[in-house]
Image (cartoon, helix red, strand yellow):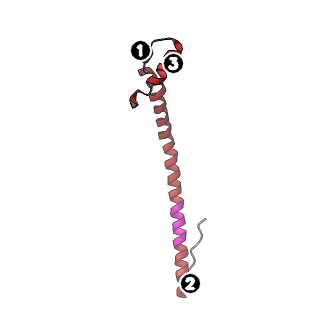
């Protein structure tokens, strides 16, 4: 019964149009061209666009990785300075990179 839920609106519409319900129940489903034009081609375009955008996303991730490494090395330098100051000995300060 759950699969025949669409039959109720068809019966109502057929009663409004004075047509027999048997003829209205023979509704044609969208064909191959409909699926090709409205489903397959747009999905293909979306996938191609996503693959093109993946290149820029990958470049951005590489840039973020480099920034993370520089930040991590700077934090390690600061930790070494703090440890050397806590131990009482002074360590030469690293030269700033220009």
The residue sitting at 39% across, 29% down in the picture is 3
Q: Is residue 70 magenta?
A: yes
Residue 31 rendering spot, x and y as whole percentages: 42, 20
First in sequence, mark 1 or 2: give its number: 1
Q: Residues within 10 Å of mark 2 (few under 14, many from 20)?
A: few
Region of the chain picked out in magenta, as a range: 67-76
Where is residue 78 drawn, in percent x and y? 55, 74
Q: Quadrant of the C terminus?
A: bottom right
Residue highlighted by disc 3? 13
Which residue is drawn at the image coordinates 54% and 71% (left, top)? 75
Foreground residue among 77 and 92: 77
Position above or below: 71 against 93: above
Q: CA distance from mark 3 to mark 1?
A: 12 Å
Q: Which mark is residue 85?
A: 2
Between residue 33 and residue 75, name the one nearer to us.
33
Identified at 54% across, 85% down, the residue is 86
For marks 3 and 1 on the same chain, the one whose residue lies earlier in the sequence: 3
Q: Neighbour class for label 3 at 10 Å: few (<14), some, many (≥20)?
A: some
Q: Which mark, by number, is residue 63? A: none
The nearer-to-camera label among 2 and 3 is: 3
Residue that numbered label 1 is attached to? 22
Q: Is residue 41 above or below residue 28?
A: below
């Amino acid at each position: 019964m759950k699969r025949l839920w669409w039959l109720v609106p068809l019966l109502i519409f057929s009663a409004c149009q004075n047509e027999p319900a048997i003829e209205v129940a023979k509704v044609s489903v969208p064909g191959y061209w409909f699926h090709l034009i409205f489903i397959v081609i747009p999905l293909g375009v979306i996938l191609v666009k996503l693959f093109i955008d993946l290149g820029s996303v990958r470049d951005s991730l590489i840039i973020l990785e480099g920034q993370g490494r520089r930040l991590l090395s700077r934090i390690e330098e600061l930790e070494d300075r703090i440890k050397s100051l806590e131990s009482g000995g002074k360590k030469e300060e690293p030269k700033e990179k220009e």
